[in-house]
Image: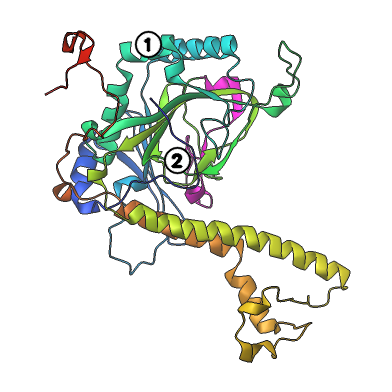
Amino acid sequence: MFEAFCSSIYSSGGNGMLPAEAVLPKQHNMMAPPMQSRRTRTHHHLSSSIAIEYNDESQHHIVTAPSFLPDDDTSFSYPSLLHHIHVLPLLTNDETTHLCELARKYATDNQSWNQQDATRHVSYPTVDFAIEESIDIENYLNQIKFEERIFDKLSTAYDIDVEDMSFLDLFCASYEAKDDTDKMINESEEERSTMDRLDFHRDGSLLSFTILLSPPNEFEGGGTIFDVLGDVSIDEKCDILQSTGVIQPPHAGYATLHSGKLLHGGHRVSKGQRIVLVGFVDVHERNMKPGILGKATKHWGRNDVSTFYNKRRLSLLKQQNVDEENEQPVWKIKNWRYLPKNTRSYFGKDFKIPPSILDNIERRASLRKIRSKRLATEDMLLREILLPREERGEKIAEQQEEGEWIEVDLDDIDDGIMLAPR
């Protein structure tokens, strides 16, 4: 029922843009009284200040991801709703405590948190279990109307109709400090393979959320780390945002809402155990502009390839420098046959690239430059992917595919013959 992969090869779907001027009234009406802003300047560099808004009455924080596109790029307004990361209370203390107890019990009984599971989240194995596997948790979430509450918050934050949302995945994850878990042995005397962090990735959903279930005093570190916030400067004390780009909710029961296409990860837990309820929320395609996600994915793929080969190349250069006593390394052409015939004679066996060209290659292939391009692509995706409300088509009921299994009433079955529904 709930099946998705937390993957850096991004899901199909997606697209479009929602002009800031079309949604600001809704954004500022989503709570009363109006937000008390703590706003600083936002620059277009890898090191930039950040905008944070906070409402004392609702305890709602809004962190706005900085822009990484040129100031003169006015094709799409900034910020879009998807630039906002929301941190707000969702569950009561009693609800959070009970959910955490149910999660611990299920995980203990089924050894769900003893090892990483690579079957559900292939690219990024996590220590978790699907909520649908626990009848007690699923029943309790239905009892407290969890789906209705979280979808309502997401709808208000990102201007997407509740009817256009569905769970792609819903699971409960555990992060444990390695210093603790390395010493823990399960009943079969095998070492537990847990996790204390999760690498940067993009979710298979347009919207995602994380709800903290364990009290913050039970662990140290943790939180959700965002690449886009990694170099921001914080002009004043902020309870939820660290200078490393980590968002840490102040209390258990708080939800962090964000676009799943923001590059993010689980920050390292240095002590204790952090338990979270995580959801990937699919958005109906009528809300999105076709082709935008595919275009972004191509750029991100090139960045990933560039990063891999640049690290490998720098490693080889370092080794050559050591072997050749800091002389300029020799560049050998491996795919000679792809060169035009009239240029092959120019490149000798031990051809050396001129220093000026080598410096330019190093500058363009630097990890900082690659990251800057990655963040610019992410910024453009957030601006474009949601269609303005007036451009969204009507939601049409999903067509039943030929050969698909369907549910029927027993009254429709007569003497072993199933009547086709009308």
Q: Position of residue 154 (x, y in %)?
A: 30, 33
In the image, 13 versus 326, the foreground residue is 13
Q: Quadrant of residue 203?
A: top left
In the image, 45 versus 53, the foreground residue is 45
Q: Residue type at mark 1?
A: Tyr
Q: Residue at x 56, y 45 (%)?
A: 244
User: In this rendering, is residue 40 above or below 211?
Assistant: below
Residue under circle 2? 203
CA gap, disc 2 to disc 1?
A: 26 Å
Residue under circle 1? 140
| Residue 237 among those drawn in magenta | yes
User: In this rendering, is residue 192 above or below 32?
Assistant: above
| Residue 69 among those drawn in magenta | no
Sequence-first tag of 2 and 1: 1
Element type where label 2 sits in the image: loop
Q: Which residues are magenta?
A: 214-241
Q: Position of residue 20 (x, y in %)?
A: 24, 52
Q: Residue type at mark 2?
A: Asp
Q: Quadrant of residue 88?
A: top left
User: In this rendering, is residue 177 above or below 377?
Assistant: above
